[in-house]
Structure formats: C-alpha cells, structure tokens
DNA sequence: GCACTGACGCGGG
DNA sequence: TCCCGCGCCAGTG
C-alpha cells in the first residue's frame, strides 16, 4: 500500500519539461518490476490526482496514454506546454528520452530515500 | 484460492 | 535494429 504513497512522492519530483518511464518510477519506489502497477495507479488516481501523469511515458519514449486523458492528444499538449518536443512517428507520439528523460542518477535515488525516511515510509 | 487482465520491460533471435 | 515472446505482479470478479 505504501507503494502508491511512494509513487506520489516520486512523481512529484519529476521536473517540469522532463519525462520518466514506468519502470523508472517503479524502481525509485523500491519495487523494480512493478511498472504495470505504476500505470494502474495513474489510471485509477491511486497516487493522487495532482501527480503529473503526462510526464510518464514508456521505456521507448512513447506516449501510451489514452483514455485517462480527456483526448488522446491531451498528454502531448501538456508536454509541449512545458517545452518538450513531441515527435510524430509511425507508431505514435514519441519524445526523445536522451533529451528529456529524467536521469535516475544515484543522487536522486538517495534524495528520494531520504524523503521516504522523513515521511516514515 | 483461481484465472484473467493490463498507461510495462527486457533479452534473444 | 526490429520483432517477438515471456516475465512481471497487484487488482478484479
């Protein structure tokens, strides 16, 4: 259950104008392999309604988002509003992870761990 | 408890 | 590089 609480904290720390992958979020929540739960939580609002769900893309940078947003292009519009370039490909809308991906550096992981300690999670 | 599902990820061919 | 298949695991009925 605290997985979703952690998710909320992790998602809040994704900087505007950057994107993170489902697996990356799961890893930072201490549950590597739970990428699917991240998608579930976002769709059902289990991690809070205010989390920046539009900054979450899959491992390849595709905007798999769909019915959770008002329209299929809502996520694209939100990202572009933050300065993220969203490209049109044969497989759908995609962002360049090398450019906009949230590098899950050691510093960030340690900082998150510290936040979890503070929150008693 | 069982079976099926899914905003996913990865290694092998 | 692209594709395919298998693994993953909490929710749901």
Image (cartoon, coloured by chain):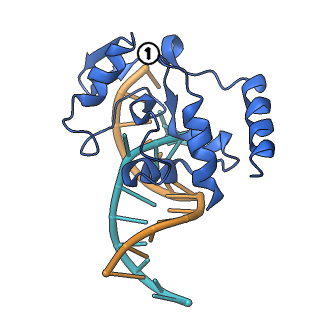
Chain colours: A blue, B cyan, C orange
- Left or right? Give the position of A66 relative to A32: left
Residue A22 locus on image (x, y percent):
51, 40
Give the residue number, with chain letter if any, for mark 1: A96
Residue A107 locus on image (x, y percent):
78, 23
- Left or right? Give the position of A3 relative to A59: right
Can residue A71 be seen? Answer: yes
Q: Residues within 10 Å of mark 1 (few under 14, many from 20)?
A: some
Q: How many marks?
A: 1
Q: Is residue A76 above or below residue A68?
A: above
Subunit of label 1: A
Q: Nearer the viewer, residue A35 or A2?
A: A2
Task: Locate the N terminus of chain A and report the quarter of the image it occupies.
Answer: bottom right
Extreme residue in the left direction: A71
Residue A114 locus on image (x, y percent):
80, 37
Q: Nearer the viewer, residue A8 or C3?
A: A8
Quadrant in which residue A56 is drawn: top left
Residue A41 locus on image (x, y percent):
46, 52
Callout 1: helix, strand or loop? loop
Q: Is residue A84 above or below residue B12?
A: above
Q: Residue at x 47, y 47 (%)?
A: A48
Q: Residue at x 79, y 43 (%)?
A: A118
Quadrant in which residue B10 is drawn: top right
Can residue A33 be seen? Answer: no
Q: Residue at x 21, y 34 (%)?
A: A72
Q: Residue at x 58, y 45 (%)?
A: A7
């Amino acid at each position: 259950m605290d997985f979703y609480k952690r998710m909320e904290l992790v998602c809040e720390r994704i900087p505007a104008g950057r994107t993170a992958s489902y697996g990356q979020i799961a890893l930072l929540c201490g549950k590597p392999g739970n990428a699917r739960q991240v998608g579930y939580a976002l769709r059902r609002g289990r991690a809070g309604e205010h989390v920046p769900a539009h900054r979450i893309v899959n491992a390849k940078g595709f905007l798999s988002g769909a019915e959770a947003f008002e329209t299929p292009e809502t996520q694209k519009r939100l990202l572009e509003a933050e300065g993220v370039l969203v490209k049109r490909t044969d497989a759908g809308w995609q962002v360049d992870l090398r450019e906009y991906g949230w590098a899950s550096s050691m510093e960030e992981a340690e900082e998150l761990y510290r936040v979890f300690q503070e929150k008693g999670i």
